[in-house]
Amino acid sequence: MIEEQWEQLNTEVRNPKSKEMDNMGTRELLLLMNQEDENVIKAVRKAIPEIERAVKLVIHALENGGRLIYAGAGTSGRMGVMDAVECSPTFSTTDEVMAIMAGGERAFVHAQEGAEDSEELAAKDLKRIDLRKQDVVLAIAASGRTPYCIGALRTAKDKGAACISLACNYHAIISDLADIAIEVDAGPEVLTGSTRLKAGTCQKLILNMISTAAMVGIGKVYGNYMVDMRATNHKLEERAKRIVMESTQCSEKQAVLALREADQSIKTAIVMLLTGASREEAEKKLYEAKGFVRKCL
């Protein structure tokens, strides 16, 4: 890639406000970083129409046996891995939300920068997780031209899977390979080229939106409660109890008994308490309602 192309990327341009960064006082630097971060919210807001389309595509895939698969390298890859991992305890997903990252699991804690330059590596990683045409591949690249992400999208297209791209520059190369292209530009980084800063924050916010809104769309939320949550420790057990109590206005004792009878399923316990149904009846109602608690009531 020729140098001129990199110089045109806003994520690589020098920020004039921080040219004297090494000569700033700590308070001055922190205020500048905070001011620059305000651009993140504005940039993400501009992309809401494309993000909405992406959410609807993901919901369709999840409803039809597909998966949401993040693909990225470096900071972008780590953002995908973090979001995918957090979906499991929050929404009881198994492999509905996954992530592949250039360099594999080791790259999450030990930088494997060279791995991002291989399109073939992405193809191998998608083959390893048995990419299917029902899936959605979401490639994340701050520059918008990471070879690993390009390879992921090309492989997905060849398989017939849906493609979403997320870039932190306009007119990104990966946008041309996607069914839905999300592009955000929060301006040059305070530390030139350090896309773990504003670009990474943009990515985090957008992935939060996509995964959370998609889980709402497939019935894993009731009100604003994570009713498909797994209570795997004491804190989460207490949260599950509070969710049942607040959703049904029952006593603590009733919530504990309902959760016990429902084998700790928050959804089932809520439906049992609000409808007077047995566990078997509540489970049947939820099955017929495709997991939506509100439709059972």
Image (cartoon, rainbow, N blue to C red):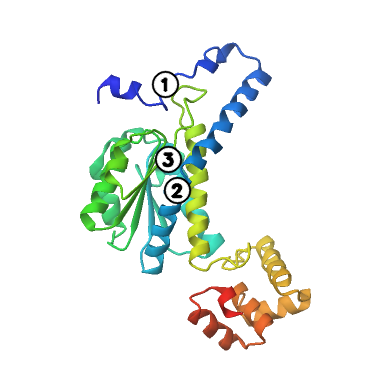
| Amino acid type at mark 2 | Pro
Q: Which residue corresponds to mark 2?
A: 49
Mark 3 and mark 1 lie on one chain; the one further toward the N terminus is: 1
Q: Is residue 247 above or below residue 113?
A: below
The Cα–Cα distance between marks 3 and 1, rounded to whole angstroms, is 19 Å
Q: Residue 83: percent from the left, percent from the top?
A: 49, 51
Question: Dot 2 lies on which element?
Answer: helix
Q: Name the quarter where the C terminus is drawn.
A: bottom right
| Camera-side residue of 156 and 171 | 171
Q: Which residue is rendered at x = 65% and y = 24% of the image?
A: 31
Q: Residue at x 33, y 60 (%)?
A: 135
Residue found 54% across the figure and 17% down from its top: 17
Coordinates of residue 183 in the picture (x, y in percent): 40, 39
Mark 3 or 1: the one toward you: 1
Q: Is residue 276 above or below residue 251?
A: below
- Which residue is rendered at x = 43% and y = 25% of the image? 193
Residue 221 pos. (x, y %): 57, 65
Asked whether 272 or 216 is in front, the reply is 216
Q: Earlier in the sequence, mark 3 or mark 2?
A: 2
Camera sees residue 122: no
Task: Please say whether residue 282 is visible from this viewpoint.
Answer: yes
| Residue that numbered label 3 is attached to | 76
Q: How many marks?
A: 3
Amino acid of disc 3: Ser
Instruction: Please name whichever residue, 85 or 62, is drawn nearer the observer in this view of the structure.
Output: 62
Give, as a three-letter code, the residue at label 1. Val
What's the distance in space between the residues labelled 3 and 2, CA to CA?
Answer: 22 Å
User: Label 1: which residue?
Assistant: 13
Q: CA distance from mark 1 to mark 2?
A: 27 Å
Asked if residue 103 is positioned above or below residue 265 in the image, the reply reads above
Q: Give SS at disc 1.
A: loop
Labels 1 and 2: the sequence-earlier one: 1
